[in-house]
Image (cartoon, rainbow, N blue to C red):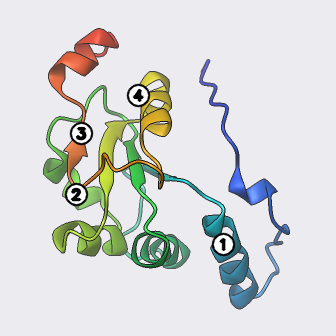
């Protein structure tokens, strides 16, 4: 409720795909979209699967090929101060890239003020995310009124 984000959606910049599209067509469109992306907002919930095919494909390509920073937003949390405590929620490709330190990530709660801040701060044009386990500190969450 009352959650509004304004950002450029890469899905609207390329050809649309249908549910009946071939997997190769879907993958091709996803790669085109990632090519135009500055960051990836990855929303993780209790229902996120370990081995969900296309999600893992997107994470692999975003990290390995396009070097896109991942803004990982977790539903059901007010703040994130210890990302590794949430590792049981990570999809396979994310877990592998966090553990081998190839992913550049910030872990945040699925809260509008935090997502907006992260989207404004972290993109392929910034050098701030240097590893897989960044998170905002306690003071930031206090300033946002979340802690």
The quadrant of the image that shows the N terminus is top right
- Sort mark 4 into few (<14), some (14-19) or many (20+) by Cα contacts within 10 Å: many
**Which circle's residue, 3 or 4, is located before the other in the chain?**
4
> Which residue in the protein does label 4 denote?
114
**Which circle's residue, 1 or 2, is located before the other in the chain?**
1
Q: Position of residue 66 (x, y in %)?
A: 49, 71
Q: Nearer the viewer, mark 1 or mark 2?
A: 2
Q: Quadrant of residue 50?
A: bottom left
**Relative depth, front residue between 96 and 119:** 119
- Sort mark 1 into few (<14), some (14-19) or many (20+) by Cα contacts within 10 Å: many
Q: Position of residue 137 (x, y in %)?
A: 18, 28
> Which residue in the protein does label 1 denote?
30
The quadrant of the image that shows the C terminus is top left
Relative to 59, residue 108 above or below: above
Measure the C-alpha gap from mark 2 to mark 4. Answer: 19 Å
Measure the C-alpha gap from mark 2 to mark 3. Answer: 11 Å
Residue displayed at 80% across by 58% down: 13
> Which residue in the protein does label 3 denote?
135
Q: Secondary structure at mark 2?
A: loop
> Which residue in the protein does label 2 denote?
131
Please report contact status of discs 2 and 3: CB closer than 8 Å, yes or no: no
Measure the C-alpha gap from mark 3 to mark 4. Answer: 11 Å
Residue displayed at 16% across by 35% down: 81
- Sort mark 3 into few (<14), some (14-19) or many (20+) by Cα contacts within 10 Å: many
């Amino acid at each position: 409720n009352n959650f509004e984000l304004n950002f450029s959606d890469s899905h609207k910049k390329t050809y649309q795909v249908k549910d009946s599209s071939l997997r190769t067509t879907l993958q091709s469109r996803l790669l085109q979209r990632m090519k135009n992306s500055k960051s990836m907002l990855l929303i993780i919930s209790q229902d996120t699967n370990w081995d969900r095919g296309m999600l893992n494909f997107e994470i692999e390509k975003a990290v390995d090929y396009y070097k896109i920073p991942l803004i990982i937003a977790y539903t059901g949390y007010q703040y994130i101060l210890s990302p590794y405590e949430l590792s049981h929620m990570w999809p396979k490709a994310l877990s592998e890239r966090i553990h081998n330190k190839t992913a550049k990530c910030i872990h945040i709660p699925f809260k509008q003020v935090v997502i907006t801040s992260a989207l404004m701060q972290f993109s392929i044009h910034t050098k701030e995310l240097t590893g897989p386990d960044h998170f905002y500190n306690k003071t930031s969450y206090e300033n946002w009124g979340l802690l």
